[in-house]
Image (cartoon, rainbow, N blue to C red):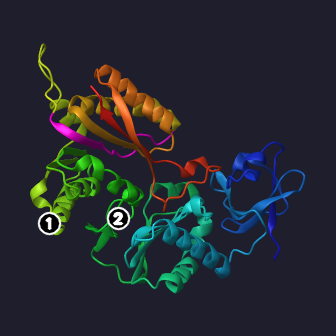
Amino acid sequence: MSLATVLLKPGEADRVAAGHPWVYSNSILRFSAPPTDGDVVQVKDHRQRLLGTGFYNSRSKIAVRILDRERVDVDRAFFRERLTAALAHRRRWLPKATSFRLINSESDFLSGLIVDKYEDVLVLQTSSLGMDKRKHLIAEVLQELLRPKAILERNDMSSRKFEGLAPVNDVLVGEAPASVAVNLNGLKFDADLAEGHKTGLYLDQQVNYEALAPFSKGAEVLDCFSFLGGFALHTARAGAKHVLALDQSADAIAAAARNAATNGLADKLSFENVNVFDWLKAHTSVKPGERVTPRFDLIILDPPSFTRNRASVPDAMRGYKEIHLRALKLLRPGGVLATYCCSHHVDAVLFESVILDAAFDAHRTLRRVAQYTQSPDHPIIPSIPETEYLKGFAYEVVR
């Protein structure tokens, strides 16, 4: 097999040699021959030392996405080995899960590919040209390994435009179901895989959903940004006295209410279709001389990402501080704040600092009682910082 060689500029190879799979276009010194977009190339440093093999795309800032440190054939056998290894990882670390992320792009050394398993249906996303050109081959291997009833293509994410790819929603295998009853920790969630948000559900919180059980028994719970009710239903099942779930999406609230009824928990939950920021402001605004009356024992903050890039981090910090300040005012002494951030651009240290700033302004002292990260089906590779994005904390209000 003859591969075009991408030679890197002096000083540009260290990050790649340390394990990061992205080669930026401005790091390239020259080519041994003009590569074709979407084809496999080999990457070498300026001294001709091999760094790896990957997909090339001249239209992307990420010119090469490295798949292996050796010279490999990216064929059926390659994908079968990678997919088999990924499945083994999930079965080891999430042995009871029937729905999970099977392939998490760089985390599974398949940059540009995501595959989510929802019971017996798979949802595939390809965010790189190289993976997109091989999606039917990947679907064939997935059929061999898992025998799904259907494989859906949910390639409607905006990031594809940076690879020169158009949005596509299609069915690669079988027939698209109207919805799938997804089992998460023994609870059923109805997921619209063809039209729902992302690929249907947020699977990265699957372990964290159960982790709040110790704080739920007998509690008055406020679940902000509830989406389909993941935290709300888990805390209700764990013994919460009552759970109020808030979300600005009317469709999400309606789906969460249906999920509550399906699981026999409707009498423990209530739902409001509101802007969470506005709701928190309205319930913590008082006249001069008055004080907010705390009414919750557990408040959950799991907002969507406030940051799309590093430039938006300062604005995001103001948003995070606002919701934490108002949530802390609504917590009773001894109550617990469980809070999460899903932005890669905000690390755990920065996230905790804004929480402590809010606590200072709210005149509250916090005791950290737990720390959270993404579920094991979203593996973290420390040499690839982008693979770590979800962080969370639980704090007890001491006074």
Q: Tag on residue 97?
A: none
Residue 146 at x, y percent in the picture: 48, 82
Q: Amino acid at mark 1?
A: Gly
Direction from residue 365 to residue 6 in the image, left or right: right
Q: Tag on residue 200?
A: 2
Which range of residues does the magenta coloring cover?
295-309
Which is more N-terminal, label 2 or label 1? 2
Residue located at (64% from left, 50% from top): 61
Q: What quarter of the picture does the C terminus occupy? A: top left
Residue 14 at x, y percent in the picture: 77, 46
Residue nearest the viewer, comparing 287 with 44: 287
Direction from residue 295 to residue 83 in the image, left or right: right
Magenta-drawn stretch contains 298: yes
Q: Amino acid at mark 2?
A: Gly
Badge 2: residue crowd in 10 Å (few <14, some 14–19, many ≥20): many
Badge 1: residue crowd in 10 Å (few <14, some 14–19, many ≥20): few
Q: Quadrant of residue 121?
A: bottom left
Direction from residue 96 to residue 250 in the image, left or right: left
308 relative to 235, above or below: above
318 relative to 160, above or below: above
Mark 1 to mark 2 CA distance (whole Å):
22 Å
Q: Tag on residue 264?
A: 1
Magenta-drawn stretch contains 91: no
Residue nearest the viewer, comparing 45 with 119: 119
